[in-house]
């Protein structure tokens, strides 16, 4: 898996890479999967309020144990970029259909989940999912992120989407980060890749346990992948089984929110 894979030009004429119907307006420039862009270009994460001297977004160079071992611990969240091709979507839908809600551990109600209503905003939404749900990271008081999280707590996923739409700062910062990327921006702003986020949430049935949660604004709700003791290893397994095995595409990338490695 590549250390850092930029967004590609879309090949699907009926959908944007977000899986949302194409429409005029409310479409952002695709964001690359690049920790330098997330942390350094216009100081995106820092401007939002993340204290990047403690945690930053860092590349995961591969899924083999020896490569996972290179990532500083403890990992707090993971962003996965994958190709939005039919084979992957079919596998995701089949997996979703097999899930029995009656046998699931209830999702922690404190998890902040944002529906995606803006085309090409999945990169920013994945970042917000990571920063809003990661435990023990430090967010500056009175920062835009802290304010956004506070407003989100009492809202539905759809209301949080409206809040994102109405927060001009996020659109401006997303645009600045995207324009600082290495890829050529296509006139129609389409691409066929998609960002999602994985975090650990408290188990509602085991006071000491944690659950692996996938946050994807295209889905109707967070997805619970079960008990989780090592988020990096657990996400690597899910990525391999649920995503990489579904296609021959090499357009995958993983980025971890992990301790700053000086």
Image (spheres, rainbow, N blue to C red):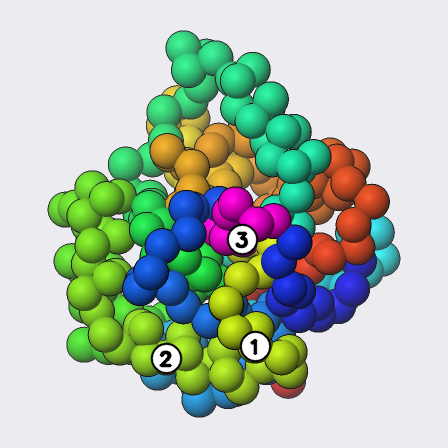
Give the magenta part as a residue range. 12-18
Residue neighbourhood size for the residue with mark 1, other residues' Cα within 10 Å, grouped as few (<14), some (14–19), many (≥20): some
Mark 3, secondary structure of its residue: loop
- Which quadrant holds the C terminus? bottom right
Mark 2, secondary structure of its residue: helix
Residue 177, percent from left and from top: 47, 80
Q: Is residue 26 visible?
A: yes
- Find disc 1 in the rendering and name its residue: 185
Residue 109, percent from left and from top: 28, 36
Residue neighbourhood size for the residue with mark 2, other residues' Cα within 10 Å, grouped as few (<14), some (14–19), many (≥20): some
Q: Which mark is residue 17?
A: 3
**Residue mark closest to the camera, 2 vs 3:** 3
Mark 1, secondary structure of its residue: loop
Give the mark count.
Answer: 3
- Find disc 2 in the rendering and name its residue: 173
Q: Earlier in the sequence, mark 1 or mark 2?
A: 2
Residue at mark 1 to residue at mark 3: CA–CA distance: 14 Å
């Amino acid at each position: 898996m590549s250390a850092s894979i930029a967004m590609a030009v879309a090949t699907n004429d009926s959908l944007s890479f977000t899986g949302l119907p194409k429409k005029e307006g409310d479409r952002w420039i695709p964001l690359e999967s690049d920790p330098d862009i997330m942390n350094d270009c216009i100081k995106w994460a820092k401007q939002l309020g993340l204290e990047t001297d403690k945690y930053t977004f860092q590349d995961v160079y591969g899924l083999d144990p020896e490569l996972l071992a290179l990532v500083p611990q403890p990992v707090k969240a993971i962003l996965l970029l994958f190709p939005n091709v039919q084979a992957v979507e079919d596998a995701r839908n089949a997996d979703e259909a097999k899930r029995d809600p009656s046998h699931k551990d209830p999702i922690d109600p404190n998890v902040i989940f944002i529906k995606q209503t803006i085309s090409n905003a999945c990169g920013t939404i994945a970042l917000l999912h990571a920063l809003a749900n990661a435990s023990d990271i430090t967010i500056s008081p009175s920062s835009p992120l802290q304010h956004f999280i506070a407003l989100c707590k009492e809202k539905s996923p759809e209301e949080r989407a409206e809040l994102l739409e109405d927060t001009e700062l996020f659109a401006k910062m997303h645009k600045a980060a995207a324009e600082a990327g290495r890829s050529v921006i296509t006139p129609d702003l389409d691409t066929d890749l998609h960002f999602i986020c994985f975090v650990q949430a408290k188990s509602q049935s085991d006071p000491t346990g944690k659950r692996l949660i996938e946050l994807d604004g295209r889905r109707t709700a967070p997805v619970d992948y079960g008990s989780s003791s090592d988020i990096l290893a657990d996400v690597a397994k899910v990525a391999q089984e649920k995503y990489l095995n579904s296609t021959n595409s090499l357009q995958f990338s993983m980025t971890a929110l992990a301790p700053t490695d000086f």
